[in-house]
Amino acid sequence: MKKRNTIWILIIVFLLLLLIGVVFLALSVGQINFSFAQILDILSKKEGVEYSVLANIRLPRILLSFAVGGALSISGLVLQGIYRNPLVEPYTLGISGGAALGVSFAIVFGLQNMFSGLTLPVFGIIGAIAMIILLYVLSLRKEYLNINKVLLTGVMISFMTSSMIMFIMATTTSENLQSIVFWTMGSLEEPNDLLIYLVFGISLVGLVVIYLFSGHLNALRLGEANARYLGINSRATIKILFVIASILTGVSVSIAGVIGFVGLIIPQLLRYLIGSDFRILIITTYLGGAIFLILSDIVARTIIAPNQLPIGVITGIIGGAIFIIALSKSKQGI
Amino acid sequence: MKIEKIVCGYSGSFLLKEVSFDIEKGLFTGIIGPNGSGKTTLFRGITGDIGLKSGNIYFEGKNLTSFTGKQRARRFAIVTQKIEVANITVEEFVLLGRFPYKKPFQFLETEEDYRLAGKYMKMTGVYKYKDKLFSELSGGEQQLVSIAKALTQEPDILLLDEPTSHLDIAHQVKILNLLQKLNKTFKLTVIMIIHDLNLAGEYCDHIIMLDNGRIHTSGSAKEVLNYKNIEEVYKTPVVTRENPISKKPAIFLISERVLKGKM
């Protein structure tokens, strides 16, 4: 037991060190490159153009990557946990489709300036919430356990929203079209600092609340009925966790667009590396997702600098590649 | 434990019709009956898988519905036929039995949790597998691990749903001997649903025979397991004799050909 706790602490310390390293890397590279010593120097002086590049451009972006990467990963972990199915991910449930549809509406109807910079996120979250409610009413309320029904409903909602988005794209101007496409592919550039702090806060609160359910999630590994026999209100637990995961996904997608694969791959990879105990898995998955997204964003904004690639492209390619390599090396599959 | 006139079932289909019985403390009770007689429905009614349409279940004089989930789990431990779970070691699995004793905001196991898990893994003979994955074990070994987890809950009553189905005779006897030992040595009340009439007769102090949602007969093995009751409930001709060693009833089946040739 002592040995296991020590290993857990070592894993967390390792990931935190990795996170710090990645944050420094993200601070140092860009149009202007800084060395490690320079970063410390600039940050301690708190003035000048260089300080403003670090504090007002790079740092908020890192913060957003951290929050979104962590949130999407634990959403995936939680959904995989409550449905005991490793292939479920936040986007299978149609939540991102709803957010994308909301944003498309806002763009097409020229509402971009309705709430100034907040318009697209606001419409995104409205769309996401609408889909969560729809999913809840259609399947989750009564048949919360029928994973196939919940999943199929989610997949169908996804199909319908993407068809509607295509309809909008086919009938709109090329300028709007470009905005929609660009938003859909995801970006971690967010000019509004307040929004970033908000996402950061929601993401961390989500992490804490989910962690409080780590024991429940552990017991749910035995299935819904066996968890109930251990004294868990499985029904309420599954619903609460589903809603938390949905909110985290909705918020992430609304701000950063559709960033694929994180919610599927990071939980899978960590489960494969450190086992299935949620008490360690939740923390490591969150940190792993945060690190992965910060790294992906570094690649996205440097590889064809001064232009940027959509972050979703990078997460898809890197994530998919890591996943296939891990899968081919493992004997029994993930 | 007292079960009073419970009616339950699935909407539109089979219902358990006002079944009442008492389970005495420290008794080894077997519930038998043909497929569709309501064994599993009864099991699910007691475990709370399905709600009771009417009737009550009392435990130590208190209605079971007044217990919280955790209180219930500290008194009743339930072993199902099969659990499918990937990527979990035997020790982790058994430790989950301590969940009902966790305090709010307690994330890690206590020394006591480990001690009890170790004790019951040794008692069930699965301690040697403690670091193995649950999914790597055979069906019989998994069943023993499930029982170890149930014991780790330190319950008053152990409820099992066909613990010996799909197992070879060696494992059947091993598991039932273990249950008998727990029952006789540690005074654990055991209730199990079982298909095999011979095993029910050999091991159970008290047998409840269900037929079509009602209790047909209940009593000792000798009282329940005679050819008359069995032929009435199972609609199958049988011969019963006394087991020469245990003096419990043994049931023999006869093929149709032999039966016709004889008659």
Image (cartoon, coloured by chain):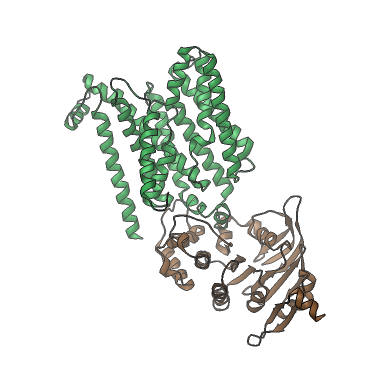
Chain colours: A green, B brown
Q: As rendered, which of A93 and A43 lies closer to the eye?
A: A93
Q: Residue furthest bottom?
A: B244
Task: Give the side of residue B219 with respect to residue A294, left or right.
Answer: right
Residue B149 placement (x, y as % from top left): 50, 64
Q: Is residue B220 visible?
A: no
Image location of residue A312, percent across then percent down: 40, 29
Q: Is residue A106 above or below residue A70?
A: above
Residue depicted at x 27% and y 31%? A26
* Location of residue B187 with respect to B101 vertically, above or below: below
Q: How many marks?
A: 0
Image height of A279 relative to B185, above or below = above
- Report the quarter where the N terminus of chain B lies: bottom right
| A166 or A228, nearer to the observer | A166
Residue B237: name its quadrant. Answer: bottom right
Location of the C terminus of chain B (image quadrant)? bottom right
Q: Quadrant of residue B216?
A: bottom right
Above or below, A89 relative to A233: above
Residue A181: x and y in percent read 45, 21
Position of B82 with respect to A35 (left or right) is right
Is residue B32 in view from this perspective? Answer: yes
Residue at 54% of width from left, 18% of height from top? Answer: A168
Question: Residue A258, located in which quarter of the rendered image?
Answer: top left
**In the shown orientation, is residue A266 left or right of residue B179?**
left
Q: Position of residue A107 (x, y in %)?
A: 49, 16
